[in-house]
Amino acid sequence: MSIPKTHPFPFDPTYGMTLEQLRSIVPPEAPAGFDAFWQKRYRRACAIDPKPALSGSKITHPAWQVLDITYASTDGIEIGGWLLLPRERPVRRGLVVGHGYGGRDAPDLDLPVEETAILFPCFRGMSKSAHPPIPPDAPGHVLHGIDKPDDYVIGGCVEDLWLAVSTLLALYPWLAGAIGYIGGSFGGGIGALAIPFDNRIDRGHLIVPTFGDRKKWLTLPTVGSADSAQTYQKTHPDVFEHLRLFDAAIAATRITVPMLVAPAQFDPAVAPPCQFAVANALPASKYNEIFILDAGHFDYPGMTEQNFALRQKVRGFFRVHEPGLSALV
């Protein structure tokens, strides 16, 4: 165990909680209409033709063909990103990869997957999906439309993920039933909200996911996106009621597909109690695994070794299985 002992923050990024206490956290109760709210949004998103458009990228790699991609999402917003295709192997799995609240400048060319079409979308308002007046920075982005659940940007980002799945299916229809999702931090929270309502996603990997247990998210000190929401709450005390519909821990209780979740015990940007609220919310299943990190959003001794071990888990989790074999073996 290498939880950092020294740090520059004016608060304790473990929040004084032991691993046993973190493991005992339970998700909050769902507000009335939670499922109906997301099911309605999902139906709206699935009715949209993503109209993917591909073009050559300046990025080159010996194992991957890299393409620039755009596709249509809800609210008339065009999403930009990258598509990776294996150069010498067939495409037998699809994977959507989200990003953190810093946006994304390039695709990850080192994911431990094979025979996979990997779509790296930039969620609305950020990086290649800049869309004024949505602020491109995390403190402004997380507040955009926060008092109007139907217009809140986080809901739109969930729809961007669903349309990313639609895009992969439009390009490669044979991937139906074999599309996964990976997302960390901001992308982890978006994934937790999206996966339970989209049965086209067959498994998910969330790393230090945010947006879990919104009451704690609006209370615990942080250097992450919750900080600006906590400041906003001081003059808008009803914001919590709006955010209950966007609680990743509540959504995670609805997930029924295999999940690999990696929460951290120390994290100055996403409070560990919020991360564990998401991880602990998963239904008991032999196909779910919680891989505990010593720290998130912070360098620590042993980080390289821990990340390597997690990478090996990811390799097995998204391995392409032979035709006729269950995806769950």
Image (cartoon, grey):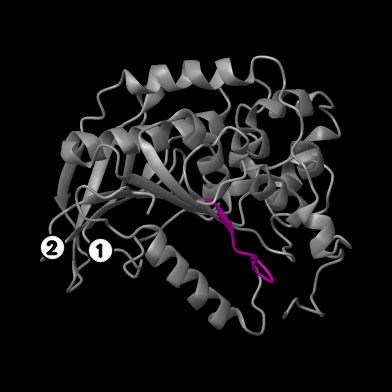
Question: What's the residue at 83%, 53% (across, down)?
Answer: 221
Image disc number at residue 85:
none
- On the question of residue 181 being in view, the answer is yes
**Left or right: 50 in relation to 307:** left
Q: Give residue 153's position: percent from left, percent from top.
A: 54, 31
Q: Give residue 100's position: percent from left, percent from top.
A: 53, 54
Q: Give residue 304's position: percent from left, percent from top.
A: 54, 81
Looking at this rendering, what residue extends furthest in the bottom direction? 301
Q: Is residue 303 magenta?
A: no
Instruction: Give the structural element (helix, strand or loop) at label 1.
Output: loop
Q: Are marks 1 and 2 in contact (CB under 8 Å)?
A: yes
Q: Quadrant of residue 131?
A: top left
Judged by its main secondary structure, the magenta piece is: loop
Q: Is residue 294 magenta?
A: yes
In the figure, 140 relative to 325: above or below? Answer: above
In the figure, 304 relative to 189: above or below? Answer: below
Identify the amino acid type marked 2.
Arg
**Left or right: 1 in relation to 47:** right
Identify the amino acid type marked 1.
Glu
- Comparing 14 with 106, the one in front is 14
Q: Quadrant of residue 52?
A: top left
10 Å crowding of disc 2: few (<14), some (14-19), many (20+): few
Q: Which residue is mark 1?
A: 114
- Comparing 130 with 202, the one in front is 202
Question: What's the residue at 40%, 46% (across, down)?
Answer: 122
- On the question of residue 150 being in view, the answer is no
**Left or right: 193 in relation to 26:** left
Magenta-drawn segment: 288-297
Q: Which residue is mark 2?
A: 89
Looking at this rendering, what residue extends furthest in the right direction? 16
How many numbered discs sit on the rendered protein? 2
- Comparing 11 with 165, the one in front is 165
